Image: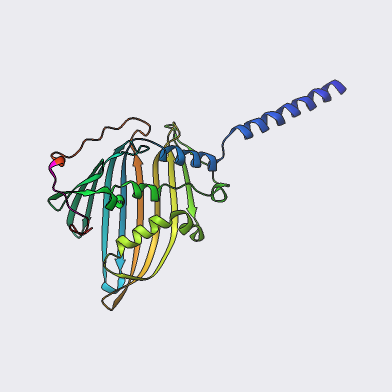
Amino acid sequence: MKTTMKFLSLMLALLLICSTLVACGKPTTFEVVTDAVNKTLALDSISATMEMTMDMEMASLGTSVEVPMTTTIKASGLQSDAPVILTELTMSMMGIEMETVNYVEGEYMYMTMLGESYKVKMEDMTDYDGMNDIDNLIKALPEALLSEIEATENADGTKTVKVEVPNDMLDTIYGELLAQVQQSAAEGATVDSCNITEAAVEITIDKDGYISVYDMSFLMEMGMSVEGFSMDVSADVEAKVTYENPGEPVTVTPPEGYQDFPEANADEIGL
């Protein structure tokens, strides 16, 4: 009997030790997400697509407008002093589609928009290379927000983390992105009030530990005025970045004839 009890005690002790080791060896959701964000933002080359959609409803005007924007980015040398970046932006609004191509090489950005091509000194154009948009969206999340969240293990080896972001954390984490979206939605108007709620983030991490998809949605309600006319605007916003084969080399092909683009300054072309 004593031998049996000693054996059971030993087995229980071993089980406890094994459980502790497994728990200690498995990274938390916070660690998984933080490592993936840091690893992805440290990439020297990327091929990515950023999609942003704003479904805006203007009750006082009895109308609604959908504004989809798609930006494709190919970049190399991001961790160097001489990155090469190709950005193609397509935006449509009320049936009108606009396309802009920006190429960064050396001290210039080479731009094609509205059928015209220019080269502009990069010192005036850092907000137009596409990388700020990605950096403003892809943020690590606080440990307190992820402490009770479990990542979903998918059949293809990826992991997905879904979390709702409390209103009081939004500005701290995503302040730059929210300011960017607000400015875009209120182009030409004065923003009198802005309230952002219902924020949710879904992050997919590939089997190599890179982010493959970072998706955020939220509701933005604004009070705006234009030349003395006030109106309320409600916008459902989604911003999503999808990476193509993160960690692999990327070839960036410049626009044809870019070296012959005439030089202009940002003020001359209204930027």
The answer to which quarter of the image holds residue 246 is top left
Residue pictured at 85% horizontal, 20% vertical: 3
x and y percentages locating residue 153 in the rendered image = 48, 36
Residue pictured at 27% horizontal, 48% vertical: 122
Q: Is residue 149 visible?
A: yes
Residue pictured at 63% horizontal, 31% vertical: 22
Left or right, 194 with respect to 32, comes to left
* Pick the front one: 170 or 108: 108
Q: How many marks?
A: 0
Q: Of all residues shown, which one is farthest toward the right?
A: 2
Q: Is residue 17 above or below residue 219?
A: above
Q: Which quarter shows the C terminus?
A: bottom left
x and y percentages locating residue 7 in the rendered image = 80, 22
**Does the magenta portion include 194?**
no
x and y percentages locating residue 187 in the rendered image = 27, 64
Residue pictured at 54% horizontal, 40% vertical: 31
Q: Which quarter shows the N terminus?
A: top right
Q: Is residue 1 visible?
A: no
x and y percentages locating residue 135 in the rendered image = 39, 47
* Pick the front one: 227 or 21: 227
What is the basis of the colouring in this image? rainbow
Q: Is residue 20 above or below residue 195?
A: above
Q: Main secondary structure of the magenta part?
A: loop
Q: Is residue 172 above or below residue 49?
A: below
Q: Of all residues shown, which one is farthest toward the top?
A: 3
* Pick the front one: 248 or 107: 107
Q: Is residue 177 above or below residue 231?
A: above
The answer to which quarter of the image holds residue 231 is bottom left
What's drawn in magenta, residue-wise? 260-265
**Does the magenta portion include 262?**
yes
